[in-house]
Amino acid sequence: MICWMNGTYQEAEDLKISPFDHGFLYGVGFFETFRTYERQVFLFDAHMDRLRAALEEFRITMPYSDQEIRDVVHQLDREANEGDGYFRLNVSAGVHDIGLTPSVYETPNVILFRKALPPASRGTEKQGIWLETPRNQPESAVRYKSHNFMNNVRGRLELPSLKESEGIFLTSAGHVAEGVTSNVFWIKEGQLFTPAIGTGILPGTTRAFLLELAKDAGIQVNEGNYSKESVEEADEVFVTNAVQEIVPLSSIGEFPLPGASGHHYQILHAAYVQAIAFACLR
């Protein structure tokens, strides 16, 4: 597998990171995951805006422009010669001495990984499982995709398979939060519900786009603090992320759901696919 690190294309097995990188020592680093469609990244600007906001808050310099990153994505897809890919753009704080210095990280390590997309058909259902692990509080006012992913890892360990199930976190106050790798939505009496950003969830790029699609479709959108029972009483439940798009749930805990046959899931999924075609395949 060919990757790109600090301006150079390298084989994956040749990548090297110093143990003095503060991304390793202290978890100081951020990442974005996305996929390509005909070698175009859907919602690319939104991903980069979120990443740059995190880097700015934690004083990590990003030495590459959005266009340079986009060009690398295209080149890695061409190098793979296997269609579209799953990407992770990783920016760590770089090499420094042990201790919480410096106060500005000006020499980060920037890596773009690419791997083949896992085989999955649109409309593939998952089971929703309530997690015993509570969702932790973010380090900032807004949650970023940081190297500190231990809470997600702890939640994932409760699941038999990420391919067939998605774990749903509750906050310490008992409010519905998000999935291990996703944002969560549900339909009740024709209205769309999702936890508010203030619960400490990741402000997902796909989440934000889906909310706009719902509004355009005339579906009332509600964001707030909701109980576990609110989801269990829902008519439909689905989760979103940039790689898997919109994934319908066939159950949540012991409660069955319509999954891919859900009326509102079908409306929103069709609109999402149409938006991809318009933005990336024209």
Image (cartoon, grey):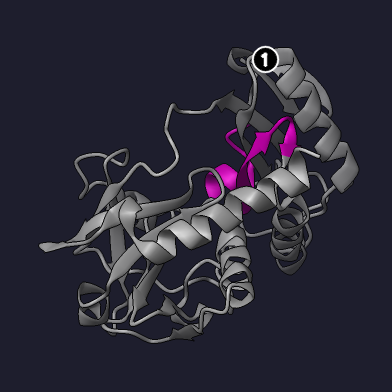
Q: Name the residue tied to disc 1.
A: 80
Across and down, in percent, residue 143 comes to: 55, 69
Across and down, in percent, residue 69 comes to: 81, 39
**Residue 36 forms part of the magenta stretch:** yes
Residue 63 visible in the current orientation? no
Q: Quadrant of residue 89?
A: top right
Left or right, residue 240 beside residue 170: right
Q: In the image shown, does 33 or 253 lie closer to the viewer?
A: 253
* Label 1 SS: helix
Across and down, in percent, residue 114 comes to: 62, 27
**Residue 232 forms part of the magenta stretch:** no
Query: Bounds of the magenta span?
Result: 18-40
- Could you tell me which residue is drawn at 53 percent across and 50 percent down? 147
- Could you tell me which residue is drawn at 85 percent across and 32 percent down? 71
Relative vertical location of residue 27 with respect to residue 194 in this rendering, above or below: above
In the rendered view of the protein, which quadrant contains the N terminus?
top right
Q: Amino acid at mark 1?
A: Ala
Left or right, residue 25 beside residue 56: left
